[in-house]
Image (tube, rainbow, N blue to C red):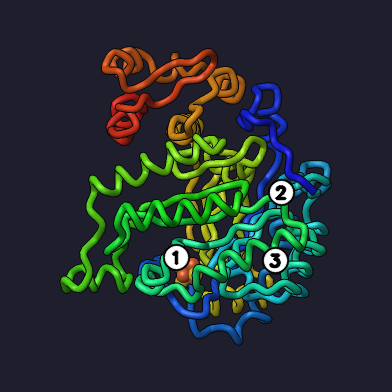
Amino acid sequence: MVISVPSSNLIRHTDIKELLQTASLYLHIPFCHTRCHYCDFNTYAGMLPLREPYVRALITEVELAGQLAQLANGTARRSRTIFFGGGTPSLLTVEQIKRLLSACYEAFTIDEEAEITLEANPGTLNAEQLAGLRAAGINRLSLGSQSFDADLLQTLGRIHTPDEIVQALHNARAAGFHSINLDFMFGLPGQTMQHWKATLDRALALRPEHFSLYSLIIEEGTNFYTWTNEGHIIPGDEDLCADMYEYADERLQAEGYENYEISNWALPGYQSRHNLTYWQNLPYIGMGAGAHSFFGGRRFSNVLDPQEYIRLLKKQQRPEAENELVDHTQEMSETAFLGLRTARGLHLPTFEERFAESFTQFVGSRLRLVEEAGLLEHENEWIRLSKRGRLLGNEVFLRILPD
Ligand code: SF4
């Protein structure tokens, strides 16, 4: 099934009330073969024997979440997207993924045309598994590719090779996947512009429907953080990093990919509906160890430790660790903040329909000051950060949004 999303892919204001009644589903699979040197996600190496008890716990959480999210008349909540993220979801068997999907279909009303994504590591995929995943209902694949340079993949601590990316993509096509994302990273230690151009050349030759490009951020607690402090690696130069971003943006746009969010490019109709849920500040329910949710006027997150998570779910207890109420003003600020960061910007009629107050009224006289400084620009019904505003993103938000 080809995922068809309107090319603007941003909500028409007539849809917003309906969309606020839905919940996107995220299922976190926190297992990896080894830990990459830059990774600070909630993921663990050496826990593969926990996969089956974890899947059982996750199924229980899906059931509990389905009950929690039921509509007032007792029917199941509608969901437009399911996303298996990690970690490395491709370390589960096809049978385990099928059981998780069945649980989602039991507990929620999943759209017939739902976007169902699975993140996969090219080093953990084979043709048979891909065919099984496609038959199970996964219709979008996101391959954590990171680079086509073998040395850089080693520097990152990845387990796959450049050829395995190509093989995984060919196998995915043969299995019937028509919506594929490739993730790449730039600003890596030792990465030159030549490396980056060569990676994009090979990636574009594969013609995936979607690209996510991230600059490396060295996070505390990672090997890269220690090695940087010890002087063993030198982080990528900031100016080079900005040049790499600009080069990629020009190159991808010339090849027909729209830059619909700072780090994401897609061929028309292939924007990630699931990720747009986050940027449009629509409800989502995250399940699994450490997963986050925004639902029912609250943001909440689960316990991080998979063993603790399994222990709680065995007792049918919800694994929530933290939660925060989101009041009306905060939701307005967050919706504006997230929307302005997308390439198209914030859709003004949708904002007004959602909050019964226009963006102009909400921001008041602060808007004029920011516009006069050339940080925001209008286009028809949209408002977005200007090129200058993008560079100063956080400052713009501080200047216009209430605390
Ligand atoms: S495969 Fe992904 S989630 Fe796992 S350690 Fe590497 S970066 Fe982290």
Contact, mark 1 vs mark 2 (Cβ under 8 Å): no
Vertical arrangement, residue 114 with respect to residue 6, above or below: below
* Residue type at the position of mark 1: Phe
* Residue type at the position of mark 3: Asn
Vertical arrangement, residue 46 with respect to residue 200, above or below: below
* Residue at image coords 54%, 38%: 255
**Is the residue indicated by label 1 positioned so its CB lies within 8 Å of ligand 1?**
yes
Pick whichever of labels 1 and 3 is earlier in the sequence: 1
Residue hosting label 3: 171
Tell me: 117 left or right of 391.
right
Q: Quadrant of the C terminus?
A: top left
Counting from the top left corner in percent of width and height, residue 77 is at 76, 46
Q: Which mark is residue 115?
A: 2
**Cα gap from disc 1 to disc 3, whole angstroms:** 28 Å
**Cα gap from disc 1 to disc 2, whole angstroms:** 23 Å
> Which element carries disc 3, helix, strand or loop?
helix
